[in-house]
Image: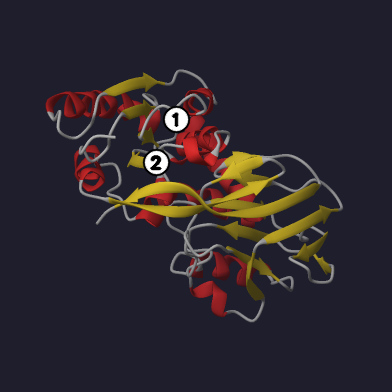
Amino acid sequence: MSDSPLGRTLLVANPAAHSGRGAEGAEFARRFLGSYSSVTDGYDVRLTSRAKEATSIAARAAGYDTLVVLGGDGVIHEVVCGLMSLPRERRPRLAVLPLGSGNDYARTLGMARNDVEGAFAQIVRGTARPVDVGRVNGTYFAETLSFGLDAAIAIDTTARRAADTSQEGEALFVTSGLKILSQAKQGFACTARFDDGEPLELAPHVFAFQIGPSYGGGFLICPDADPSDGLLDVCYNTRKPSLPRLMALFGLARSGRHVRSSVIETLRIRHAELEFDAAPPCQVDGEPLEGTSFSIDLLPSALSVIFPS
């Protein structure tokens, strides 16, 4: 690698990100890389055109020093899955140009959101740090895995984005949340084992496993989660709250104050096994995942990611 900040660089961009603004962002990124030769030791640009294409591109990125991904949490998720298929010693470090609706992984990293020029400046001056990656049933996640009503909300927001809703970020999550929570009845019965503990019989409405603090465009479901501490943060409800209280907890989660409630349990773990009575709504970095049995692991320091200095 040369003395350039990024070395040999691959830019992976989703031109459809943020209601089509990804194409403009990708063109700016291309011009930036071409204009500042001291930033890289050569670069290539790949634009995605279909779902999961970023995963296959990242899986072939072993010859690069840095992979810069432009887009929202969905394409970041795909890139992380691709990088994790490479041997650890051949994984490029990851840099993020956040351009999306939720941008929760960008929040965790402290990156400028929906500001490609500002984020690029942070990357060039940034510092690479090791971060953890989660894994559920062989699928990797960078930020969030959840089951139950919160997963149903995340899946609904994804569907609404695909239908080109004008809402985004917190507003999108809130309106989906009000719709889903108003229909809430019983929880989702399961048997859960955390690390080497005894099995627990649970029926949570909300069951989240987090690398970073937030999901849904900034809802602090696990406000103290640290992406580099070698632990998964878990949040779930231990008793069935009334619908008004459930709605109140949803509002408190915007600032992380829900964790003070007597019906909320938080844990830090490395491994979990879940067995649901029936397939629950499940999302991994905003993408749906189906099943009734889930094996969840934390892979410490699995990726090197550039943070703002």
For image coordinates 48% across by 29% down, the residue present is 58
Mark 2 or 1 closer to N-term? Answer: 2
Element class at badge 2: strand
For image coordinates 41% across by 27% down, the residue present is 63
| Drawn side of residue 103 relative to residue 230, left or right | left
Q: Residue 147 carries which label?
A: none
- Does 21 appear above or below 176? above
For image coordinates 19% across by 35% down, the residue present is 39
Percent x, y of residue 240: 74, 70
**85 or 12: nearer the viewer:** 85
| Quadrant occupied by the N terminus | top left
Q: Which mark is residue 164?
A: 1
Q: Residue 94 carries which label?
A: 2
For image coordinates 48% across by 70% down, the residue present is 224
Badge 2: few (under 14), some or many (20 or more) residues near its Cα, within 10 Å? many
Percent x, y of residue 278: 84, 48
Instruction: Residue 27: tell me if it is visible.
Output: yes
Dot in front, 2 or 1: 2
**194 or 16: nearer the viewer:** 194
| Drawn side of residue 28 relative to residue 224, left or right | left
Amino acid identity at mark 1: Asp
**Residue placed furthest toward the right:** 277
| Quadrant occupied by the C terminus | bottom left
Badge 1: few (under 14), some or many (20 or more) residues near its Cα, within 10 Å? few
As measured in the structure, the alpha-carbon distance from the residue carrying label 2 to the one carrying label 1 is 29 Å
Percent x, y of residue 65: 35, 34
Amino acid identity at mark 2: Leu
Element class at badge 1: loop
